Image: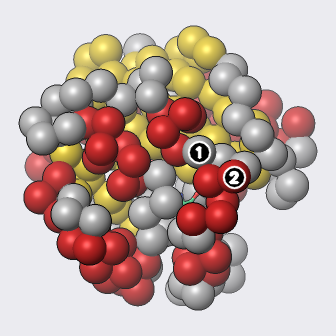
């Protein structure tokens, strides 16, 4: 596993319910995730944002969660089952050279990259794979941690994303974070 990737045990800390005091996924996502949507959560860790995305997507929706680390996805699946969300959550393990999303081409309404872009060595490749998975009017909601990512670093990440055929449409306020929403094309 590459050095830059968040260790699997940090997943337990990131999934702590106490984090909702600072970042409440329902409040953050409710304007973007609607009933029936197909959501792609890339780098979900143990699912802190994925479960509330699944609640907002409702019975007719689904959330595909793709992470490099098997231990993250194993825990995410167990938690999804305990929360009665297993039918809406599809946990998948990918690898460092591919997100392995070919079966999703053109199907995703909203992609989430939350605290993951700074861990990705080849951001253009990563964004191109997400782009392919999105519907023609699909959106990408990117959040990065303010503590690790400077204003300049985030501006650079936004620029790279725009160069991958995404248009910046919004800069939402997310506590302790830098955030941007893009539309495909
Ligand atoms: C800092 S954690 C964030 C977890 C979650 N999104 C959150 O905010 O709580 C970053 C996650 O992204 C995953 N990750 C890193 N690089 C990745 C890649 N290239 N493809 C998929 N997942 C990746 C890591 O394994 C880790 O679970």
Residue 124 coordinates in the image, percent (x, y): 53, 43
Quadrant of the rendered image containing residue 3: bottom right
Label 2 packing within 10 angstroms: few (<14), some (14-19), many (20+)? few
Decide if residue 102 is in sight here: no
Q: Which residue position is annotated with label 1?
A: 24
Image quarter where the N terminus lies is bottom right
For image coordinates 26% across by 53% down, the residue present is 64
Secondary structure beneath disc 2?
helix
Question: In the picture provided, is 156 more to the left or to the right than 33?
Answer: right
Viewer-side residue, 167 vs 97: 167
- Which disc is residue 21 wearing? 2
Residue 99 coordinates in the image, percent (x, y): 34, 59
Decide if residue 79 is in sight here: yes
Question: In the picture provided, is 105 more to the left or to the right than 120?
Answer: left
Residue 137 coordinates in the image, percent (x, y): 31, 15
Quadrant of the rendered image containing residue 160: top right
For image coordinates 40% across by 86% down, the residue present is 71
For image coordinates 48% across by 33% down, the residue present is 29
Secondary structure beneath disc 1?
loop
């Amino acid at each position: 596993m590459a050095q830059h990737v968040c260790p699997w045990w940090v997943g337990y800390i990131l999934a702590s319910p106490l984090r909702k005091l600072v970042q409440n996924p329902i409040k953050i996502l409710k304007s973007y995730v609607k009933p029936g949507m197909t959501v792609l959560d890339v780098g979900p860790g143990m699912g802190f944002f994925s479960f509330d995305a699944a609640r907002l997507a409702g019975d007719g929706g689904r959330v595909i969660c793709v992470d490099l680390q098997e231990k993250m996805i194993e825990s995410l699946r167990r938690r999804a089952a305990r929360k009665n969300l297993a039918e809406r959550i599809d946990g998948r393990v990918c690898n460092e050279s591919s997100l392995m999303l070919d079966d999703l081409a053109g199907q995703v309404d909203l992609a989430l990259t939350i605290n993951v872009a700074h861990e990705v060595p080849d951001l253009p490749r990563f964004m191109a794979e997400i782009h392919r998975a999105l519907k023609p009017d699909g959106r990408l909601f990117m959040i990065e941690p303010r503590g690790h990512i400077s204003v300049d670093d985030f501006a650079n990440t936004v620029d790279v994303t725009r160069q991958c055929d995404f248009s910046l449409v919004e800069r939402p306020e997310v506590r302790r974070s830098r955030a941007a929403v893009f539309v495909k094309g």
